[in-house]
Amino acid sequence: MKPQKYVVGFFFDKSMSNIALIRKQKPQWQAGLLNGIGGKVEDSELPKVAMWREFKEEAGLNTSQLTWVNFCTMSGVNNDGSAFEVEFF
């Protein structure tokens, strides 16, 4: 089975002293916690395109796809045995 793919982005200002984060609403046990901006990678979608799309949807900012640079990829297995992969930008 293919892993479910996700992206998470950390968008800094030019001074690198401020970062755009979201306050989680779901799932309930994460409500109120801060998180990077991101979500699921759609079928046949490149991770960089998914990052651009998710940031536009969640933060309302239309960045350039060139803004996003992958710096880390993490993969693992959930408690239910399903695999996941997260690309960090």
Image: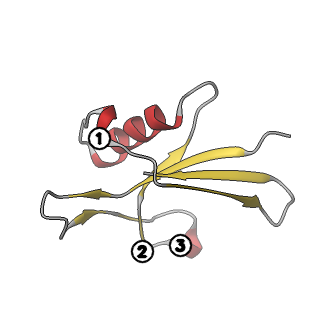
**Residue beneath label 2, please?**
32
Asked whether the residues under the numbered discs 3 and 2 touch, taking CB atoms below 8 Å apart as contact, a structural biologist would say yes
Q: Amino acid at mark 3?
A: Gln
Residue 67's label in the rendered image is 1
Badge 3: residue crowd in 10 Å (few <14, some 14–19, many ≥20): few
Residue positioned 64% across, 28% down in the render: 43
Q: Amino acid at mark 2?
A: Gly
Residue 15's label in the rendered image is none
Residue positioned 26% across, 42% down in the render: 60
Q: Earlier in the sequence, mark 1 or mark 3?
A: 3
Q: How is the image coloured?
A: secondary structure
| Vertical position of residue 10 compared to residue 5: above or below | below
Q: How far apart, in angstroms, are the residues tagged by discs 1 and 3?
A: 28 Å
| In the foreground, 32 or 79 | 79
Residue positioned 78% across, 62% down in the render: 78
Q: Name the mark nearer the viewer: 1 or 2.
A: 1
Asked whether the residues under the numbered discs 1 and 3 touch, taking CB atoms below 8 Å apart as contact, a structural biologist would say no
Badge 2: residue crowd in 10 Å (few <14, some 14–19, many ≥20): few
Q: Amino acid at mark 1?
A: Thr
Picture coordinates of residue 57 (x, y %)? Answer: 36, 40
Picture coordinates of residue 32 (x, y %)? Answer: 42, 74
Say what secondary structure mark 3 lies in. helix
**Residue beneath label 3, please?**
30
Residue positioned 53% across, 62% down in the render: 26
Q: Name the mark nearer the viewer: 1 or 3.
A: 1
Drawn side of residue 48 relative to residue 27, left or right:
left
Q: How far apart, in angstroms, are the residues tagged by discs 1 and 2?
A: 27 Å
